[in-house]
């Protein structure tokens, strides 16, 4: 009875659910960035976490060290993230994939890119954590006994807007259908003469934009440092793999499930258990349901 | 390039490094760091280059070696060398168990799971009492064989011999029938399976062997330094383990050793580079991946062949005129 009561105490704690919403939105946005790269280029861009970190870290550095306004620093961070994503595609991923050496080379290439972004950020902006400087925040307010922080509403609104726009862009526009076609079967698209390179470039740019908005907004709550890059990458990857690749909304579910684990596992079992639990969850999902909850439907 | 040339050049390079270090303690410690990285990179070479399977748990395997030495000595009273003997089988067992659990995974999925495992493993080491928690284990005794305590120079020499022997052995292994089969399994796994050789078993053996070699790197480092803590095996170790064979050249195990030498030189030995050494390493990897996918050794081989062809052409033209 005491155990049940203790269990309910966590599940009925509104503050924890607000954390679930905030984390879930962030994870889902990172997953969405992965989704764009997977859809348009047919591979997982492990640089996503580093791009999100670089945008947030640069924005924070510009505000705290150079006195730029938050919106301006945010714009610079977002544009920088898009530029990094585009350069990554043009200078690294495309030449490596063009050699046709398979997935391993692409994985190493994005891994090296991720490491390079971490090192560049650390060298020029410092290795120490910085407070986030979101371009949009609201005054904190209370809902019952729970306190809603300054970044909760912005990240929820941004998540809703980006998912809706992504859905419309990918499902309702000619460019979106083209991108999906290329991601589904690049060889067939090449035979048909479709503009593969343009679609790939756009998918990288879109992923960079989404990752940057996610990183800048979430850093307002958690702070940011170069060390975040790898964790954010793995989190986004897990959100996509758990949610699935069958629909653009899937990372939202993946992000939500991951956020539940991220908030309630430490609450009930302690922070260290989360790391061990994630390994098990990842192993089980990757091994038995690698297509995620929402699998792509194939017409036969 | 003759098949034996990298072996001869590799051994010669190690001899030159020993001469360079001499009795200078700072240089000796740099050389030990380089040999530690070389052993981790040689371990990575087996599954990554030979089997085409990217496991990102190599910081965990190196840590296994380091803690096997430290725990055996600090808690069980073993001599350091016994820990070095125990480390490889322990690391191999961990790698085989993880490999069996992730047998259905490859590429990005395998990379993500093994990375999460490595992080969880290092976190576990920082939480256990037997490992000394976050501060680790310090104050280990000097290396001793039945009363004989080798000097730091002799310890370095033994580590050089160990690294050289393993590089030579891996080169032999690469060209052996087993090496040919496992390299074939990387390119055409279905064909190898159809021929009656289990690709899964090949991969597990490669993972076990690689982890065992990498654990020797961690064991060597702990033996020389006399201490260990979880911070030693950061995420950087994982990245560098992948990068070193690529930088040196994936065509030969000596490429991993050369890659380790280049990484340690750039990150620790060039004062003017200071903290930008690691950035230079990662940029080098990107350049190598895009422009010289066979690494420094591959580029040197191509350049040597080009030079020979040019020399032959010039000589022939000279003879005609």
Image (cartoon, coloured by chain):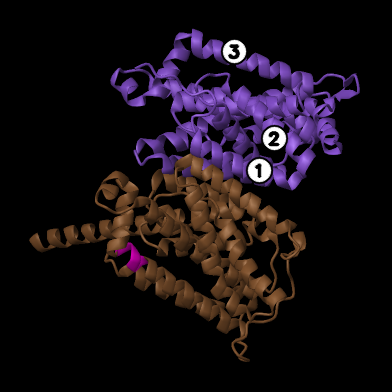
Chain colours: A purple, B brown
What residue is shown with label 1?
Answer: A277
Q: Which residues are drawn in magenta?
A: B171-175
- For label 3, the crowd category at 10 Å Cα-Cα, with few meaning under 14, some 14 to 19 and many 20 or more, is few
The residue wearing badge 3 is A165
Magenta stretch holds residue A268: no
Discs 2, 3: same chain: yes
Q: Give whichever of B262, B165 is nearer the camera.
A: B165
Q: Which residue is mark 2?
A: A261
State the residue lying farthest toward the bottom: B147
Q: Secondary structure at mark 1?
A: helix
Circle 2 or circle 3, nearest the eye:
2
In this rendering, would B181 be left or right of B106?
left
Residue A233 appears at what percent x and percent y? 60, 37
Image vertical order of residue A233 relative to residue A168, above or below: below
The C terminus of chain B, quarter of image: bottom left
Residue drawn at x 26%, y 58% as measured from the top left: B305
Is residue B172 a member of the stretch shown in magenta? yes
Image height of B232 relative to B196, above or below: below
């Amino acid at each position: 009875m005491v155990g049940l009561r203790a269990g309910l105490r966590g599940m009925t704690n509104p503050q924890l659910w607000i954390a679930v919403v905030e984390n879930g939105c962030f994870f889902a946005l990172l997953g969405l960035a992965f989704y764009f790269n997977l859809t348009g280029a047919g591979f997982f861009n492990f640089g996503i976490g580093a791009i999100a970190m670089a945008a947030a870290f640069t924005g924070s550095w510009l505000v705290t060290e150079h006195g730029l306004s938050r919106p301006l620093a945010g714009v610079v961070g977002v544009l920088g993230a898009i530029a990094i994503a585009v350069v990554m595609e043009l200078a690294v991923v495309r030449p490596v994939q063009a050699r046709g050496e398979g997935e391993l080379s692409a994985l190493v290439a994005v891994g090296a890119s991720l490491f390079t972004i971490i090192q560049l950020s650390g060298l020029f902006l410092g290795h120490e954590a910085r407070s986030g400087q979101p371009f949009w925040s609201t005054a904190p307010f209370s809902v019952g006994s729970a306190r809603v922080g300054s970044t909760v509403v912005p990240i929820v609104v941004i998540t809703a807007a980006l998912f809706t726009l992504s859905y419309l862009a990918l499902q309702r526009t000619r460019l979106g259908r083209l991108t999906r076609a290329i991601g589904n079967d690049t060889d067939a698209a090449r035979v048909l003469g479709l503009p593969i390179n343009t679609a790939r470039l756009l998918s990288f740019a879109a992923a960079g934009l989404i990752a940057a908005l996610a990183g800048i907004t979430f850093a307002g709550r958690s702070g940011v440092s170069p060390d975040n890059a790898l964790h954010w990458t793995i989190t986004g990857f897990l959100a996509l793999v758990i949610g699935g690749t069958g629909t653009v909304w899937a990372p939202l579910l993946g992000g939500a499930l991951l956020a539940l684990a991220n908030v309630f596992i430490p609450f009930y079992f302690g922070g260290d258990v989360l790391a061990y639990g994630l390994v098990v969850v990842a192993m089980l999902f990757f091994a038995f349901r690698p297509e995620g909850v929402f699998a792509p439907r194939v017409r036969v | 390039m003759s098949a034996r040339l990298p072996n001869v050049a590799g051994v010669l390079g190690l001899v030159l490094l020993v001469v360079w270090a001499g009795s200078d303690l700072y240089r000796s410690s740099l050389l030990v760091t380089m040999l530690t990285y070389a052993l981790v990179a040689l371990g990575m070479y087996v599954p990554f280059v030979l089997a085409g399977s990217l496991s990102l748990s190599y910081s965990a395997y190196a840590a296994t070696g380091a803690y096997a030495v430290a725990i055996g000595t600090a808690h069980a009273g073993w001599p350091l060398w016994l820990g070095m003997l125990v480390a490889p089988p322990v690391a191999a067992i961990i790698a085989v168990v993880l490999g069996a659990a992730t047998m259905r995974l490859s590429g990005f999925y395998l990379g993500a799971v093994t990375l999460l495992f490595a992080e969880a493993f290092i976190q576990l080491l920082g939480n256990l009492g037997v490992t000394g928690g976050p501060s680790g284990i310090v104050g280990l005794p000097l290396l001793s064989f039945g009363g004989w305590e080798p000097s730091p120079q002799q310890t370095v020499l033994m580590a050089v011999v160990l690294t050289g022997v393993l590089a030579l052995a891996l080169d032999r292994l690469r060209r052996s029938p087993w090496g040919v089969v496992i390299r074939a399994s990387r390119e055409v796994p279905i064909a190898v399976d159809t021929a009656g050789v289990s690709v899964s078993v090949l991969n597990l053996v490669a993972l076990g062997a690689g982890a065992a070699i990498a654990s020797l790197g961690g064991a060597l480092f702990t033996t020389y330094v006399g201490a260990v803590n979880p911070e030693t095996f950061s995420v950087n170790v994982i990245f560098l383990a992948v990068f070193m064979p690529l930088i040196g050249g994936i065509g030969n195990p000596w490429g991993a050793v050369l890659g380790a030498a280049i990484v340690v030189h750039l990150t620790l030995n060039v004062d003017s580079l200071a903290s930008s050494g690691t950035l230079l390493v990662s940029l080098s990897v990107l350049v190598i991946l895009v422009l010289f996918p066979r690494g420094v050794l591959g580029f040197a081989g191509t350049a040597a062949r080009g030079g020979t062809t040019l020399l032959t052409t010039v000589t022939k033209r000279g003879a005609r005129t």
